[in-house]
Image: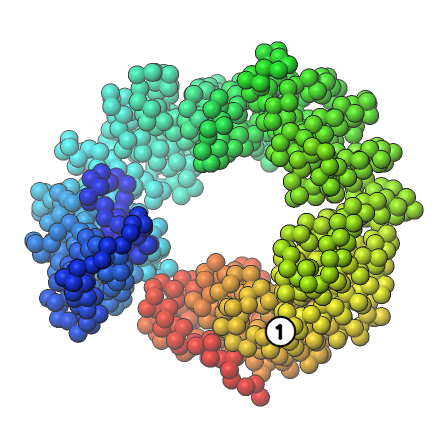
């Protein structure tokens, strides 16, 4: 979030609708309509230069001058006509917010009666951000003056502007997170706030907002507080829960503050503090919220309170549902009384949505109780069916999560373990499934119509079409839940009846009535995995219906996908062979109607050939006819090139089932159209070849990749790649500069190596010689990736040792020359990624070649240079490589090379440890924390107390202002535990805490990184 964005961080309950009060966000590019620039007058040019000049010279200003400059910069940002001046003002304001002067200047301007709204919003947000992130900049004695100033501001803005009041409230709450309770006086901030409200009742609205945001800041990790202090703050608030609720109860007497009181109550309930259910059940705040549900105008705050109460009753920290039964017994009847309003047409849609939310919350929270199938719980289920039947999808879909969770409770064996023996478990399970059967049958009927295409589907925008697809996916998930409870066959019967109705109204050529049939088929397709392959009542009738449906593009697309979804059923069906001709005709029609239906038909073709491959071995001629038409683009087939890969895969899987002799001939036939097309391109000569677009090669090479991947006949594939090698070599030689073509070609070679293995013969030698030479010239990362596949297959083969040793030494030597500093890692992250993936493969598959080699120490040095690269995959590959080195003893082949490893790692151990701790504490993003932590703990496990000493020397460099002695000791103790054999998976919490402490704000992070200096360590020579 840009700190100087006046609208950022403001809570939704204080939105201002007046657009004049929402100026452009700072820190983001401001877009303007492109207009012909008008020549600037000399006066405007002079003014623009003057503004910029004042901003540039602001460093030497006094406090008063800075205040004026802030106002001037804000005025320039929102009102100056010159874009460059606005951008300059934006940058200056952001830089200003990071300065120590921002504290005093913002405070002064907030107290200044002449400050306009823009200035107030900017300064309140700046002050809030400074308290959250930079509180440690201030001396300890600054707390009281700051608290008093914020308190004065809270009183000043108690009537608004709301955005400013909210920011001040958050600032005070953030201050409470930083400062222990005793510094606020007896009882901490809550009692301090109570005393302030008693002394100054006229300012209660402002104080109420502070009371509301206080518990929210417990979970605000933007506040730069240490983890220990954050936990302590939560304890302080929970210990003062009773005081807070007493304050809110007292404020209930002020009628105009009721909504604000209830919102604050909802906020405090989120702390999930264990107040007994019996106490809450009769609490005035609870009774007020429940009674407000029945008012003419439904209170949003009341709904929020009741929602939080529902969640509260099942939270583990509150004792769970069994302890909270008295409260549940008060809540449920009040919510159930709202059921009649779901169908009240006079009700506002937002009110109905709020009611639906409460029912959904009850379902989600009490699902385990509901799953018992008691009469009381079925009342809630029927209410949730009522919500699911609402015409508005946004309301109906609120229940979807409940139906899933209920299905899990009904079907998973773990839910019945308390019933003892297997017979009792099965009896109870069957009883419950029977109780909920009719509910899920109703659910299937209710949701199945929601997948129907709208009448104006052709006019839908991209976003609307995306939303419609998401709706269909969500409904499909609900149908799967229903099938899990009812069984696939029972669900299929319900949906089949809807298909019959739809087909009856469809007619042969009335395309405008295709939508109900398409919707029913979509639903039938969704549950395909739950319908038995031996189902013989409904599926034969469904398959007989399909050829009679009109060839409307969307309908035909769904028909094709449905056929593909039931490919296993087609294979098992007694009359499966008799159905195949009509099915294939439908798929061929799909390939001819539109690109979408062609893509669906190609996918279905793949599934059929996969699951029915044995039956289709005798029909290769017909399959090849379809394949040739699609690949060569003959006739009216509209299969896109990417989707034609499904057909390549389909034929490849059928060929896999053939005997070796037949498979070899069939493989030649499969390759023929691809070879012919590629040969025509290659025959045009190097000069023309060099100028062609990559797609003219990759569309054919990708088909070879699929052939080599899915034809599981190693000798036949080895023979094919040997015959194809001259074409591949010609492309390697001419297009080695082209990354896309090389990636495609290396992918094809990778699958050829993977499938053929040791049958590759001399071809593998030629291939490796080719990429080894080309890598020196063109540095394509995919050459490294292909080499890693070769290492995986041939690494342990003694007969390959010499040329593999030469390969890895050549590749790694050249790569370490390319990656000599962090800038080169940043410029070539793909090379770094694939290089260290290859190195990890070498550790696992050929340590005998790699560890003793001359390139191993230089690659370790290279990893130390690049480990802090910000590219995620490259960084992870380097960290994984280091972890694999440290874990060498965990593999039997690597164990014997420990002594060689140690001669490389131990002299570098202190530096590696320091780099890894730097990564842990901020040199890498926190998303990399798990990988960094494992590497550091693996190093400690490998080198024991020696690694702990390295870490101790390293962490001692960090000033105590950044990491306290207690935090250091906790971190080192964790490493000591690992060194003495503790399970590293149980010791990551202290690593995360050290990371949090060192990243708590920018200043601390800079101090830590400045002390550890990870980028300088790899420059020191290793003796």
As drawn, is 661 to the left or to the right of 50? right
Of 964 and 160, which appears nearest the observer?
Answer: 160
As drawn, is 165 to the left or to the right of 596? left
x 52%, y 21%: residue: 449
Q: Quadrant of the C terminus?
A: bottom right
Image spot of residue 413 (x, y percent): 62, 34
Image spot of residue 923 (x, y percent): 45, 68
- Residue at the extreme right of the image, as rendered: 661
x 64%, y 26%: residue: 556
Q: How many marks?
A: 1
When asked about the image quadrant of residue 530, the answer is top right
Image spot of residue 868 (x, y percent): 49, 69
Q: Which residue is denoted by mark 1 in the rendering?
A: 815
The image shows residue 154, relative to residue 928, as above or below, that is above
Task: Give the SS element for disc 1.
Answer: helix
x 60%, y 67%: residue: 831
Q: Quadrant of the N terminus?
A: bottom left
Of 320 and 493, which appears nearest the observer?
Answer: 493
Q: Is residue 951 visible to the viewer in this orientation of the structure?
A: no
Q: Is residue 304 visible to the viewer in this orientation of the structure?
A: yes
When asked about the image quadrant of residue 742, the answer is bottom right
């Amino acid at each position: 979030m840009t700190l100087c964005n006046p609208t950022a961080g403001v809570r939704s309950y204080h939105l201002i609708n007046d657009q004049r009060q929402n100026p452009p966000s700072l820190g983001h590019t401001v877009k303007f309509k492109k207009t012909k620039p008008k020549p600037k007058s000399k006066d405007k040019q002079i003014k623009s230069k003057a503004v910029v000049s004042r901003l540039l010279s602001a460093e030497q200003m006094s406090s008063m001058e800075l205040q004026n400059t802030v106002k001037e910069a804000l005025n320039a940002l929102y009102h100056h006509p010159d874009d460059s001046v606005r951008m300059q003002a934006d940058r200056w304001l952001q830089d200003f917010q990071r300065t120590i002067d921002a504290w005093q200047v913002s405070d002064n301007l907030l107290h200044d009666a002449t400050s306009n709204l823009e200035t107030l919003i900017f300064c309140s947000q700046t002050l809030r951000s400074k308290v959250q992130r930079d509180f440690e900049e201030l001396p300890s004695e600054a707390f009281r003056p700051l608290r008093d100033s914020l308190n004065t501001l809270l009183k000043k803005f108690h009537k608004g502007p709301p955005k400013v009041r909210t920011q001040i409230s958050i600032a005070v709450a953030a201050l409470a997170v930083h400062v222990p309770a005793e510094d606020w006086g007896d009882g901490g901030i809550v009692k301090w706030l109570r005393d302030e409200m008693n002394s100054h009742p006229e300012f209660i609205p402002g104080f109420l907002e502070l009371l509301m945001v206080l518990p929210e800041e417990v979970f605000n990790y933007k506040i730069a507080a240490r983890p220990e202090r954050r936990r302590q703050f939560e304890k302080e608030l929970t210990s003062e829960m009773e005081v807070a609720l007493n304050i809110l109860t007292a404020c209930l007497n002020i009628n105009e503050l009721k909504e604000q009181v209830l919102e604050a109550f909802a906020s405090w309930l989120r702390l999930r503090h264990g107040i007994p259910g019996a106490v809450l059940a009769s609490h005035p705040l609870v009774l007020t919220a429940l009674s407000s549900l029945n008012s003419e105008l439904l209170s949003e705050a009341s709904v929020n309170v009741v929602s939080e109460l529902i969640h509260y009753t099942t939270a583990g920290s509150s004792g769970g549902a069994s302890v909270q039964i008295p409260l549940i017994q008060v809540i449920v009847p009040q919510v159930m009384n709202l059921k009649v309003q779901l169908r009240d047409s006079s009700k506002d849609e937002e009110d109905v949505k709020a009611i639906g939310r409460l029912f959904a919350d009850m379902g989600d929270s009490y699902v385990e109780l509901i799953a018992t199938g008691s009469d009381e719980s079925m009342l809630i289920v029927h209410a949730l069916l009522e919500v699911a039947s609402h015409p508005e999808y946004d309301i109906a879909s609120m229940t979807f999560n409940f139906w899933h969770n209920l299905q899990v409770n009904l079907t998973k064996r773990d839910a019945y373990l308390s019933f003892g023996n297997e017979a009792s478990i099965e009896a109870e399970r069957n009883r419950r499934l029977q109780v909920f059967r009719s509910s899920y049958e109703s659910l299937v009927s209710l949701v199945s119509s929601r997948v129907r295409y709208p009448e104006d589907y052709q006019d839908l925008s991209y976003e609307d079409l995306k939303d419609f697809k998401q709706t269909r996916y969500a409904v499909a998930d609900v149908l799967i839940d229903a099938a899990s409870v009812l069984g696939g066959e029972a669900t299929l019967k319900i949906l089949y009846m809807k298909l019959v109705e739809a087909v009856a109204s469809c007619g042969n050529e009335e395309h405008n009535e295709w939508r109900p049939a398409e919707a029913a088929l979509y639903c039938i397709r969704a549950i395909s995995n739950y319908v038995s392959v031996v189902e013989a009542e409904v599926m034969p009738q469904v398959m007989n219906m399909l050829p009679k449906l009109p060839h409307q593009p969307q309908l035909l697309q769904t028909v094709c996908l449905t056929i593909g979804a039931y490919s296993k059923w087609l294979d098992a069906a007694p009359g499966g062979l008799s159905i195949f001709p009509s099915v294939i005709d439908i798929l061929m029609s799909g390939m001819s109607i539109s690109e979408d239906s062609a893509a669906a038909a190609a996918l279905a073709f793949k599934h059929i050939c996969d699951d029915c491959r044995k039956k289709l071995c005798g029909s290769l001629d017909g399959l090849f006819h379809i394949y040739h038409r699609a690949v060569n683009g003959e006739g009216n087939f509209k299969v896109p090139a990417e989707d034609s890969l499904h057909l390549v895969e389909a034929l490849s899987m059928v060929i896999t089932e053939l005997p070796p002799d037949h498979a070899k001939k069939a493989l030649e036939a499969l390759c023929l159209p691809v070879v012919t097309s590629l040969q025509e391109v290659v025959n045009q000569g190097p000069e023309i070849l060099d100028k062609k677009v990559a797609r003219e090669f990759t569309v054919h090479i990708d088909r070879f990749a699929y052939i080599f991947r899915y034809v599981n006949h190693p000798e036949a594939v080895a023979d094919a790649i040997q015959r194809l090698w001259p074409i591949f070599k010609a492309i390697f030689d001419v297009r080695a500069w082209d990354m896309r073509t090389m990636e495609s070609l290396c992918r094809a070679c990778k699958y050829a190596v993977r499938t053929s293995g040791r049958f590759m013969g001399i071809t593998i030698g030629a291939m490796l010689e080719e990429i080894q030479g080309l890598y020196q010239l063109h540095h394509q990362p995919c050459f490294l990736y292909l080499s890693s596949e070769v290492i995986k297959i041939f690494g342990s083969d003694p007969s390959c040792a010499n040329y593999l040793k030469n390969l890895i030494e050549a590749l790694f030597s050249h790569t370490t020359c390319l990656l000599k500093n962090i800038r080169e890692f940043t410029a070539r992250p793909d090379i770094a990624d694939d290089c260290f993936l290859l190195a990890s493969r070498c550790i696992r598959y050929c340590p005998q070649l790699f560890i003793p080699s001359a390139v191993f120490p230089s690659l370790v040095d290279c990893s130390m240079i690049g480990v802090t690269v910000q590219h995620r995959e490259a960084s992870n590959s380097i960290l994984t490589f280091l972890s694999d080195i440290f874990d060498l003893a965990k593999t039997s082949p690597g164990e014997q090379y420990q002594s060689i490893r140690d001669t490389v790692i131990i002299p570098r151990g202190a530096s590696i440890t320091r780099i890894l701790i730097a990564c842990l504490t901020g040199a890498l993003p926190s998303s990399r924390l798990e990988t960094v932590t494992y590497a550091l703990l693996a190093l400690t496990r490998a080198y024991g107390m020696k690694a702990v000493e390295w870490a101790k020397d390293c962490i001692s460099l960090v000033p105590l202002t950044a990491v306290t002695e207690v935090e250091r000791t906790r971190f080192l103790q964790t490493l000591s535990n690992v060194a003495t054999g503790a399970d590293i998976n149980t010791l990551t919490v202290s690593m995360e805490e050290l990371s949090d402490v060192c990243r708590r704000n920018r200043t601390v992070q800079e101090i830590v990184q400045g002390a550890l200096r990870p980028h300088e360590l790899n420059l020191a020579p290793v003796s």
